[in-house]
């Protein structure tokens, strides 16, 4: 076996691992959708189906002292941080065994033990909070990087602007990761900005910015990895705009009828399962291995959700606890 | 304050079967139709017709007076202030009342000051539509009832419709008002309440209340979606021989103090029920006004609300906090028996 | 709730002659000294030492734990939330309470939810220092008293020191508290109140009140800079044979309900005086709690505050709105005579 | 007389008119300072001394339908809009005859009849409001341009960001004018940003941005004039960063001891009175004409302030009026 072969083999192994992880996230979300449609879960739930490439690419970069701040569309990010799917299902199902004991729900998952400092359901609000996590790292002897993930629409929120300037002015180790899925709820981002290349805003703050393919975990790992490294070494924040797509509605129940001509076809071709499957096929990976990734993920999520469903509902008599120290 | 303080009728009336959400739509349509200065904008309200479908069809029919905005509440509210100063009559949507807090400055420090500080040389007839409250599974940042915050802001009118008819009437009154008005709707009501709604009637003036039930043993003041629970509780208690007078104070600013005081004086007992947290809630103001008026009550006033908590997502936990119809009837019965 | 619920002393005590502003400085110095996790930041607070000079010398002595920030209240408050989640104990300044409204989301939707939603796995021991109130010539956007907005936010502790000693003690208690605490100071007090301040004493627990004057004819509850006017009015009325009990509720959350109820029960009359607007002000809550406790009062409770207005800049206009000591004594006398 | 001579003569006439207007603003402010120090005026007052070049350059551009939104440091902008100094003094002195009848004070002056939609004492809050004025112009048949003026520090406020994106996305006729005096209260702007060339943020919004010399009314007239023209003709917003300096403290009473080495000397050389005086001297304008500009301004402000002082204080019995319609 030549060195080129070895490299190719390792690239293929990585792609297969990535596909497995993408499938874990997707199978999780599809199971959540079933639970929501069956009425086991209630309320507004925002799935990340189609956007998994970003979280998968990022997952290996997140170190033990790092802190991740996501949005309501953050189930995949919790999984990327290593949170157990069962505890996430349980939270979404309002169970006592959920990561927040039912207090957070789908849109406010928190698992600090895994570096997952939680989802946030106020658009843009996580960005300044991430600055604080980075700031804490300056004083607690860690080399923490704070990763804040938000959507294209969040770029128009004042808090995100303040956070970017704050981080840039103080060279804080924050990575601003914009998942640009081209929609802010039901409205296309390109009609809501004068400059649709959102990463270009970085220059105005004096920080690097770039646009990457969020569908390719390998590219995410590489380019987001640079941003992590720069941050960790004291070089300050970066804005990374990861292009992606959500294949489903904004929330479960969204009729999702606003797509532009050709959009769905393009999305289906670009999305990470399609991309990684193509890549693996081209590299000669067997159909069995490829199908196995999906199968294993579905089995895992089937049993995790079953366990979560079996757990008791959150106990109403505890509802007043933990308001104050 | 009369139940319906009216100004001359403007258009022909008709009655249609509408849900609460459709009634809001009809009110917006009427205002866009009869007031050329109106603008309607907010996140996802135009082309998509709103996340709850409430503004459907208005973009199609009124063109660029109806438009979608970036996710920029400060820009939405601030531009409404500016457009109103310059003669427009903007109707803007803040999708959830919780989101108003990212731009609360524009409401409190800007909008509410315009008329006062300029001695009326400038006015800001802005209507802010929003919705609030608890719904199953909603997280802590999408569940609050925040009317009390706005009711501590002099210069801003506030109302909270519960029926489809009021969803229509109050919104029309708000848009026609020369003062800024906050209209707090409730997303759980949008698909409900289908029934005859009288459209095109005379424009009401902000103010007034709805006597939802006459009674003699106690006055219960409530507003918003809680009204349904209170009425259910009142029906239960009626069977047990307890007669409640239920006042739905659809307008909270201006507040119908005289009517509430008169009712409490008649029944000799006052309860206030709201979905907001009890401490610092507007129920305290209602109690303080009645107490301040020297009404003799035979039992201390009762306040029921969220018991000073954040709002959890799990429905089982919310049930441990927010009073339901059963909790209300029980609490009221025990309270009256303690007299 | 005891007047001073103390935990073990941490440092040697000493007494120094300090103004209110100097007492704040001393408290910050102590906290920076004894709690290595503290950070102190805000606009102009480090190198310049604060627009009121209150934070002078702290940058010099504590280095980069004390720093100036951009004019970005969302970033200031949001980063405090994040830093606190990760183990720091940030003390941040919002220069005027009015400015907190540009970033109110970070207080209500973020800071106050941290502990509750995570079941205590995360905590947010943030201290927010701000100052508020009317001062001669200040404009409508720099004059408000907004404590009621924060007091409707469960999860957030709130206090309002008036004396130099309390400016010190309450702030030390706030920073040591594991809950988020809002400390509302008053810029007119910074240069005043020079007198002996005991430093380094035991850390108090949030809670408690100050009985500023014992009396038998009526209980007057007040807080903040209004306390001075109330005490002046009480002195005037004492000469006229009217004996007021003046309770300064320095902690508004937690609120010393039992003590206030007991005093009102003893005197049979309750007045609340605050600088904030009356409607929706915290005075309503105080009245509602006393009424709810079934205290028999021989005269309806009295509330004095800003009479639901924006705040004009001209001192002559403010004088037409905000009750001064003379207005208070007159109102209280007339009120008690009406009994 | 040659064409060149005529042009030079007209340029000189303009410079002299500019100097007169600069002096009107400065004499106004110096009189305000005296009134404040004497105790006739009270409270926090923010003077624009040194920054007059920007307002003077802008004044000719503001048409009858235009709307100007300033900050607490806006006395000069009210004068630029043509508001009578007496009514401004009266307002600052809390008189019934003030532009707001005493309700606004120094920091909240309003004179809509002159297109002066007022000062604002919340940093950055005027920018979104200006967007609304521009939006109104789309629907009321005017060709209104909305001018929003704010400081360097305001660039870090969320509301300004939201306003810039809003205006850019909708091509609103807004001119964003940042008066960069290098200080945000007592803190230098260059330590509070990662990129001190603030105009560079414009590109991220997809709008033009440039930095100009705010001390030279001629340059302001020219470059800001372009922005007005673009806006008026439907070309959307522009960000103009006018470099200037305040020669005095942030507010009256500020000990102003934070200046950097060499700053005061540089400022003294660059400020508009010095600049215009030099220019006029070079063009051969007589000392008498130059001194006359100052003298006339001082006389005007002396008598305007005397008249204002003679007016009655705002009547306390009217304090509750005008809260509602
Ligand atoms: C401050 C605020 N405004 C509005 C909303 C309502 N809202 C929730 S998600 C969303 C769209 C966000 O779009 P984007 O940032 O692109 O994220 P995506 O949902 O596409 O992941 C909006 C407007 C909110 N939660 N918070
Ligand atoms: C939202 C808000 N935060 C803080 C302040 C306090 N403040 C008033 S002026 C000022 C400095 C503004 O600096 P800049 O924008 O450069 O304007 P300049 O005063 O230099 O004209 C600050 C921080 C405020 N008024 N509003
Ligand atoms: Mg998006
Ligand atoms: Mg400046």
Image (cartoon, coloured by chain):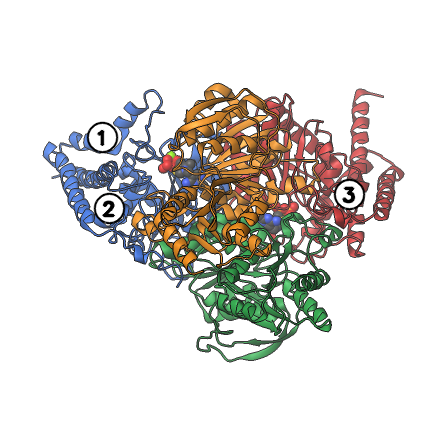
Chain colours: A red, B green, C orange, D blue
**Res D89 label:** 2
SS at mark 1 in the image: helix
**Chain of the residue where label 2 is placed in the rendered structure:** D
| Above or below: residue C188 compared with residue B92 | above
Residue position for label 3: A98
Badge 2: few (under 14), some or many (20 or more) residues near its Cα, within 10 Å? many
The residue depicted at 85 percent of the width and 21 percent of the height is A1
The residue depicted at 89 percent of the width and 39 percent of the height is A288
Quarter of the figure with residue A124: top right
Asked whether the viewer can see residue C202, the reply is yes
Q: Quadrant of ligand 4?
A: top left
Badge 1: few (under 14), some or many (20 or more) residues near its Cα, within 10 Å? some
The residue depicted at 70 percent of the width and 31 percent of the height is A221
Q: Is mark 3 within 8 Å of ligand 1?
A: no
**Closer-to-camera residue (D291/C55):** C55
- Mark 1 or 2, which is nearer the eye? 2
The residue depicted at 49 percent of the width and 54 percent of the height is C269
In x, y percent, where is residue B236? Answer: 72, 69
SS at mark 3 in the image: loop
**Chain of the residue where label 3 is placed in the rendered structure:** A
**Res D274 label:** 1
In x, y percent, where is residue B165? Answer: 58, 72
């Amino acid at each position: 076996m030549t060195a080129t072969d070895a490299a190719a083999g390792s690239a293929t192994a990585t792609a297969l691992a990535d596909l497995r992880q993408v499938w874990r996230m997707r199978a999780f979300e599809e199971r959540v959708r079933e639970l929501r449609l069956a009425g086991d879960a209630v309320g507004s739930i925002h799935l990340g189906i189609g956007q998994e490439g970003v979280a998968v690419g990022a997952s290996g970069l997140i170190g033990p002292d790092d802190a991740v701040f996501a949005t309501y569309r953050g189930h995949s990010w919790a999984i990327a941080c290593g949170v157990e799917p069962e505890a996430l299902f349980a939270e979404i199902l309002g169970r006592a065994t959920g990561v927040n004991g039912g207090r957070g729900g789908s849109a406010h998952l928190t698992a600090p033990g895994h570096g997952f400092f939680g989802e946030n359901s106020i658009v843009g609000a996580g960005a300044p909070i991430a600055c604080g996590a980075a700031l804490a790292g300056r004083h607690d002897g860690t080399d923490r990087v704070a990763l804040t993930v938000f959507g294209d629409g969040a770029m128009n929120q004042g808090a995100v602007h303040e956070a970017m300037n704050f981080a840039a002015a103080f060279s804080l180790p924050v990575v601003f990761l914009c998942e640009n899925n081209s929609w802010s709820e039901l409205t296309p981002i390109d009609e809501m900005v004068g400059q649709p290349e959102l990463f270009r805003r970085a220059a105005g703050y004096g920080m690097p910015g770039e646009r990457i393919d969020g569908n390719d975990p390998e590219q995410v790992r590489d380019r987001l990895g640079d941003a992590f490294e720069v941050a960790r070494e004291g070089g300050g924040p970066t804005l990374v705009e990861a292009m992606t797509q959500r294949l489903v509605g904004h929330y479960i129940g969204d009729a999702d009828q606003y797509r532009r001509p050709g959009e769905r076809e393009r999305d289906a071709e670009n999305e990470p399962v399609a991309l990684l499957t193509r890549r693996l096929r081209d590299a000669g990976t067997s159909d069995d291995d490829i199908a196995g990734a999906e199968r294993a993920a579905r089995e895992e999520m089937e049993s995790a959700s079953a366990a979560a469903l079996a757990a008791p509902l959150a106990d109403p008599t505890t509802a007043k606890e933990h308001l104050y120290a | 304050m009369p139940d319906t303080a009216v100004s001359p009728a403007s258009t022909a009336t008709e009655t249609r079967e509408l849900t609460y959400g459709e009634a809001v739509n009809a009110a917006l349509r009427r205002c866009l139709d009869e007031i050329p200065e109106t603008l309607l904008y907010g996140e996802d309200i135009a082309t998509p017709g709103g996340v709850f479908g409430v503004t459907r069809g208005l973009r199609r029919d009124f063109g660029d007076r109806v438009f979608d905005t970036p996710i920029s509440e400060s820009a939405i509210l601030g531009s409404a202030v500016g457009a109103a100063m310059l003669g427009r009559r903007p109707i803007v949507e803040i999708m959830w009342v919780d989101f108003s807090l990212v731009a609360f400055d524009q409401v409190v420090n800007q909008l509410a000051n315009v008329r006062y500080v300029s001695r009326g040389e400038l006015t800001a007839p802005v209507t802010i539509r929003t919705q609030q409250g608890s719904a199953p599974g909603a997280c802590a940042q999408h569940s609050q009832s925040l009317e009390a915050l706005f009711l501590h802001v002099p210069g801003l009118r506030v109302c909270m419709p519960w029926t489809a008819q009021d969803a229509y009437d109050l919104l029309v009154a708000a848009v026609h008002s020369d003062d800024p008005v906050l209209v707090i709707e409730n997303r759980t009501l949008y698909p409900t309440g289908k029934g005859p709604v009288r459209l095109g009637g005379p424009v009401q003036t902000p103010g007034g209340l709805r006597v939802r039930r006459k009674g003699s043993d106690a006055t219960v003041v409530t507003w918003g979606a809680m009204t349904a629970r209170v009425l259910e509780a009142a029906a239960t208690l009626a069977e047990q021989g307890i007669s409640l007078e239920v006042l739905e104070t659809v307008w909270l600013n201006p507040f119908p103090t005289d009517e509430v005081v008169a009712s409490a004086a008649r029944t000799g007992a006052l309860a206030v029920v709201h979905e907001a947290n009890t401490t610092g809630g507007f129920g305290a103001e209602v109690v303080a006004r009645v107490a301040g008026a020297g009404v003799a009550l035979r039992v201390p006033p009762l306040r029921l609300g969220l018991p000073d908590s954040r709002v959890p997502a799990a429905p089982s936990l919310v049930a441990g906090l927010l009073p339901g119809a059963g909790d209300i009837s029980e609490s009221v019965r025990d309270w009256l028996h303690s007299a």
